C-alpha cells in the first residue's frame, strides 16, 4: 500500500492543487456575482454552466482520451481551465461567465476522468478502496482549503482569478512529469434512466435530488452567505464548514448503512437534514450554533450521493454496476445543473432564507419517497448488502471505480466453472433426447 501511495504522490499533489483552485473559484464567483449585482436568478444560471459542462465532458472526453492519450488530454484540458478563469476576470458579464463556467466544467470532467482512471489502474482489489479513500480526503480537503484562500485578496479585484489560474497551471507539473505509466482506458457504457429506475426507483430519484442539493450548495452557498451580511472571511468559513461537515458525516452514516441498510439511513439522514435545514432558516447570527447548523446540514445532505450509489448497487449484478454508474453520474449532474438556478429563483422570490428552505424541501422529498418505497418492496438482508464506499460529490467519475468489482474476476470464475456448465448442458441435451424418444415410442 505504501509503495502504491509513493508511486501516486505526484497525482495526489496535482489533484490537491486542482481542488484548491476549484473550491476557490466556485466561492469567488458567487461572491463576485453578488458584488456586481448580477441578481440571484442570473447567478444561479451562471453557476449551472459548470454542471452542464460536466455532463458534456463526461460524454466527449473519454473519446478524446482514446484518440490522443491521457497525458495530452490532461495537459490540454488543464490549460483550458486555466484560461477560462482569466477570461472571467477580464469580461465581467453573465453570458461570458456562463460560457466560461461551461468550459471549466468540461475541462474538470476530463481532468477527473483521467486522474481517477489513473488511480484505478494503479491499485489492486485489496488496496483500491483505501486508495480511493485517500483520494476523497485529498479532494474534499482541497475543496475546503480553497475556501480559505478567498481571504488572500479582494474578490472585487483580479488577483484571486489569477491565483486560481496559477494553481491549475502548477497542478499540471507533477502529473505530467510523473514516471507512472498511463492506464488503459475504457469508455463507460451507460444504461437508460428508465431501465435503472425499474431496478431501483429510490436510487434514481435520490441521486437526482442529491445532485440538486450539490448544485445548491456549491452554486448558491456563497451568494446566500453574502446576502445575509457575512464578510469575505466569514463566507469562506461558511463554505469551508459546509464541506467539512459533509466529509465528517460520510463515515458515520456509512457505518450505519452497513448495519441498518442504506434505505433506513437515507430516511433518517434526509429527515434529520430537512429538519435542521428548516431550523437554519431562522438563524443568521454568527455564533457556534450557527456554524454547527451549517456543518450538520452539509453533513446530512452531502452523503446522500454515496448512500444512493450503495442502495442502487445492492440491486445490481457486478457486471451491471459499471454500466449503471455512468447513468447515476449523469442523473447527479443534471440535478446539479437544475438545483442552482432553482434555488436562486426561490431566493429571489422569498429571500436568502430560501437557500436552506430549498435544501429542506429536497431532502424531505427523498425521505417521503424512501418511506413509500419501503412499503412497496422488502429490502434485502443486511448480509446481502454491499459495503458502503465514500463517493466524492465533486467528481463525475468516481462512482464507476467500485472497489468491489473486477470484470476479470467474473471472467475467471466463468472459466473455472466452464467444465461444470458444459457437463450440465450435455446432461440437459441427453434428457431432452430421451424425453423425445419416449414420446415417439408411445
Image (tube, helix red, strand yellow):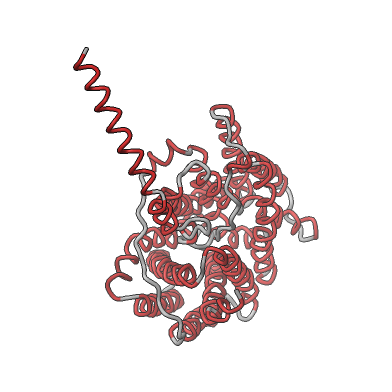
Q: Percent from the top left, x then y, of residue 131? A: 57, 68
Write down the quadrant of residue 105 in the picture.
Answer: bottom left
Q: What residue is rendered at 34% in x and 61% in y?
A: 187
Q: Percent from the top left, x then y, of residue 416? A: 41, 53
Report the number of discs: 0
Q: Nearer the viewer, residue 241 or 45?
A: 241
In the rendered structure, the answer to whether residue 412 lies left or right of residue 311 reads left
54 vs 232: above or below:
above
173 vs 322: above or below:
below
The answer to whether any part of residue 36 appears in the image is no
Q: Nearer the viewer, residue 107 or 2?
A: 2
Quadrant of the image containing the C terminus: top left
Residue ranking furthest to the right: 288
Q: What residue is rendered at 44% in x and 74% in y?
A: 88
Q: Nearer the viewer, residue 82 or 333?
A: 333
In the rendered structure, the answer to whether residue 253 lies left or right of residue 207 reads right
The answer to whether any part of residue 397 appears in the image is yes
In the rendered structure, the answer to whether residue 43 lies left or right of residue 102 reads right
Q: Percent from the top left, x then y, of residue 163? A: 53, 82
89 vs 33: above or below:
below
Residue ranking furthest to the top: 442
Q: Percent from the top left, x then y, of residue 102? A: 39, 64
Q: What residue is rendered at 52% in x and 79% in y?
A: 14
Q: Nearer the viewer, residue 263 or 150?
A: 263
Quadrant of the image containing the N terminus: bottom right
Amino acid at each position: 500500500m505504501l509503495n502504491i501511495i509513493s508511486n501516486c504522490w505526484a497525482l495526489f499533489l496535482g489533484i490537491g492543487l486542482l481542488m484548491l483552485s476549484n473550491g476557490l473559484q466556485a466561492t469567488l464567483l458567487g461572491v463576485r456575482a453578488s458584488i456586481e449585482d448580477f441578481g440571484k436568478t442570473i447567478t444561479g444560471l451562471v453557476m449551472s454552466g459548470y454542471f452542464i459542462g460536466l455532463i458534456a465532458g463526461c460524454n466527449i472526453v473519454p473519446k478524446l482520451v482514446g484518440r490522443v492519450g491521457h497525458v495530452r488530454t490532461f495537459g490540454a484540458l488543464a490549460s483550458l481551465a486555466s484560461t477560462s478563469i482569466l477570461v472571467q476576470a477580464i469580461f465581467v458579464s453573465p453570458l461570458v461567465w456562463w460560457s466560461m463556467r461551461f468550459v471549466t466544467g468540461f475541462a474538470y470532467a476530463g481532468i477527473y476522468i483521467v486522474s481517477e482512471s489513473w488511480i484505478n489502474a494503479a491499485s489492486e482489489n485489496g488496496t483500491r478502496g483505501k486508495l480511493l479513500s485517500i483520494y476523497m480526503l485529498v479532494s474534499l480537503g482541497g475543496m475546503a482549503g480553497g475556501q480559505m484562500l478567498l481571504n488572500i485578496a479582494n474578490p472585487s479585484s483580479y488577483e484571486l482569478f489569477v491565483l486560481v489560474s496559477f494553481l491549475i497551471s502548477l497542478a499540471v507539473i507533477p502529473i505530467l512529469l510523473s514516471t507512472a505509466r498511463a492506464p488503459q482506458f475504457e469508455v463507460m457504457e451507460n444504461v437508460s434512466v428508465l431501465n435503472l429506475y425499474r431496478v431501483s426507483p429510490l436510487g434514481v430519484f435520490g441521486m437526482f435530488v442529491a445532485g440538486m442539493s450539490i448544485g445548491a450548495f456549491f452554486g448558491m452557498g456563497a451568494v446566500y452567505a453574502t446576502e445575509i451580511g457575512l464578510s469575505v472571511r466569514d463566507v469562506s468559513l461558511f463554505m469551508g464548514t459546509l464541506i467539512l461537515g459533509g466529509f465528517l458525516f460520510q463515515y458515520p452514516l456509512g457505518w450505519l448503512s452497513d448495519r441498518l441498510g442504506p434505505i433506513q439511513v437515507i430516511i433518517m439522514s434526509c429527515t434529520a437534514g430537512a429538519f435542521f435545514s428548516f431550523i437554519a432558516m431562522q438563524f443568521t447570527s454568527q455564533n457556534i450554533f450557527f456554524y454547527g447548523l451549517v456543518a450538520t446540514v452539509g453533513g446530512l445532505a452531502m452523503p446522500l450521493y454515496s448512500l444512493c450509489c450503495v442502495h442502487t448497487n445492492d440491486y445490481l449484478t457486478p457486471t451491471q454496476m459499471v454500466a449503471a454508474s455512468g447513468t447515476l453520474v449523469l442523473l447527479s449532474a443534471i440535478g446539479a445543473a437544475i438545483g442552482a438556478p432553482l434555488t436562486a429563483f426561490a431566493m429571489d422570490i422569498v429571500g436568502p432564507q430560501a437557500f436552506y428552505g430549498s435544501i429542506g424541501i429536497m431532502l424531505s422529498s427523498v425521505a417521503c419517497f424512501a418511506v413509500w418505497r419501503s412499503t412497496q418492496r422488502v429490502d434485502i438482508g443486511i448480509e446481502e448488502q454491499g459495503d458502503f464506499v465514500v463517493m466524492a460529490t465533486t467528481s463525475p467519475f468516481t462512482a464507476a471505480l467500485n472497489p468491489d468489482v473486477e470484470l476479470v474476476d467474473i471472467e475467471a470464475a466463468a472459466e473455472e466453472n466452464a467444465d461444470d456448465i458444459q457437463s450440465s448442458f450435455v446432461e440437459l441435451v441427453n434428457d431432452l433426447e430421451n424425453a423425445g424418444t419416449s414420446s415417439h415410442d408411445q
